[in-house]
Amino acid sequence: MAANEQGARSQYSIECNRLTRKFGSFTAVDNLSLRVRKGELFGFLGPNGAGKTTTINMLTTLIHPTSGSAKVAGFDLATDAAMVRSRIGVVPQSFSLFEELTPIENLWYLGELYEMKKELVAQRTEELLKIVTLYDKKDVQSGTFSGGMKQRLSVAAGLMHQPEILFMDEPTTGLDPQSRIALCELTQRLNQTGITVIYTTHDMDEADKICQRIAIMDHGKLAALGTSAELKSLQGHSHKIRVEFDRLNEQMVDELKKLVGAVSATVDGKSVELRVKRLKPNMVRALSEFADRKSVSVGDLKISEPTLEEVFIGLTKKELRD
Ligand SMILES: Nc1ncnc2c1ncn2[C@@H]1O[C@H](COP(=O)(O)OP(=O)(O)OP(=O)(O)O)[C@@H](O)[C@H]1O
Ligand SMILES: [Mg+2]
């Protein structure tokens, strides 16, 4: 089979098989096996030092695996690195373009590096600067840009040679909330055009919002992988009901657990947190009738779903940023 055909045939953008990278005796990525489907917006979540960048560096052919193998865009890292490189774009963790050049000059430089035809460079440059909303800044020195503008320019640079997979390593870290939202929206729009996106982030709400599936890494290993809903279901409950009364005793807690079908309950002063697998209809009315029967009054009542943050802390026993 010709190499080109081989790449096109795979239904996966990435297939890692026991991918491992050691630095001396330290194992930064430990037997990582996972598959990313074509067209996915796939998130890598993990605390500092989990091995996210090391994984990306291997998948983008910057460093060699110590053992294990991986295919990217259907091509083996070990035997077809050039084919892999021709099909991927990278937005690195820190700005790596020329600060003294303008966006136009930076993109032309890349076009020449990739040996693209002049007409194509001109067309891509204009198209991409419009997509990342930097067209009106095309002749301004990149060094004067804000963090968000630099990241958008990095995205344009990563897309210059029309890659089918875009790797983005913590693209929103250090950005203000508005630039963050703009970059997330841009990422989603790009993904909707069919580009597979590998997205690492520390921001769990962001991963929750934009990623179709998420891999949680810790100590170089895969701790969990799934959609946000699948990961949240690992918590064993679908909702938490936190309700405060003016009086609360053990018997009331037992009755409340039965009333709402809770799998567990935690008491905190006059509040109780009940965790249920499924939210019953008319839960609020049932609680208020319960309060009437017991002649107590209900204070605060809050119903919430588990967050990715809770799942993450449950799995890794640590916060993302300490
Ligand atoms: N070139 C290297 N030499 C030695 N150790 C390294 C090297 N590169 C990474 N490491 C170590 O490997 C581990 C994983 O690092 P990596 O940069 O992949 O983590 P990360 O998940 O990207 O973290 P962050 O969220 O901080 O970017 C860390 O303990 C790091 O110190
Ligand atoms: Mg990193």
Image (cartoon, rainbow, N blue to C red):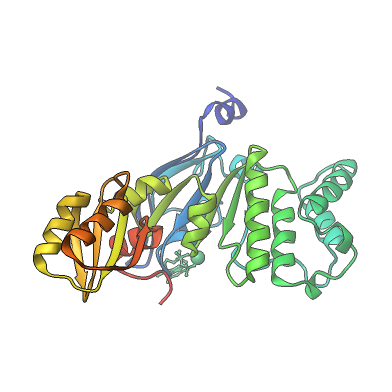
Q: Is residue 4 visible?
A: yes
Residue at 28% in and 54% down: 235
Q: Is residue 166 above or below residue 54?
A: above
* Relative side of 273 to 228, left or right: left
- Residue at 32 percent across and 47 percent down: it is 282
Q: Quadrant of residue 305?
A: bottom left
Where is residue 291 shown, x and y percent of the image?
A: 23, 61
In the figure, is residue 11 to the left or right of 119? Answer: left
**Image height check: is 199 above or below 141?**
above
Whole-percent x, y for residue 309 in the image: 39, 62
Is 86 above or below relative to 141? above
- Closer to the camera, 49 or 113? 49
Expressed as whole percent of the image width and height from the top left, the position of residue 178 reads 67, 66
User: Of residues 7 and 268, which is closer to you in this image?
Assistant: 268
Quadrant in which the C terminus appears: bottom left
Is 139 in front, or is 286?
286
Image quarter for residue 182?
A: bottom right
Quadrant where the image shows the N terminus = top right
- Residue 201 rendering spot, x and y as whole percentages: 51, 61
- Front residue of 112 and 54: 54
Image quadrant assignment for residue 241? bottom left
Is 128 placed left or right of 21 in the picture? Answer: right
| Residue at x 82%, y 57% (from the top left corner) | 109
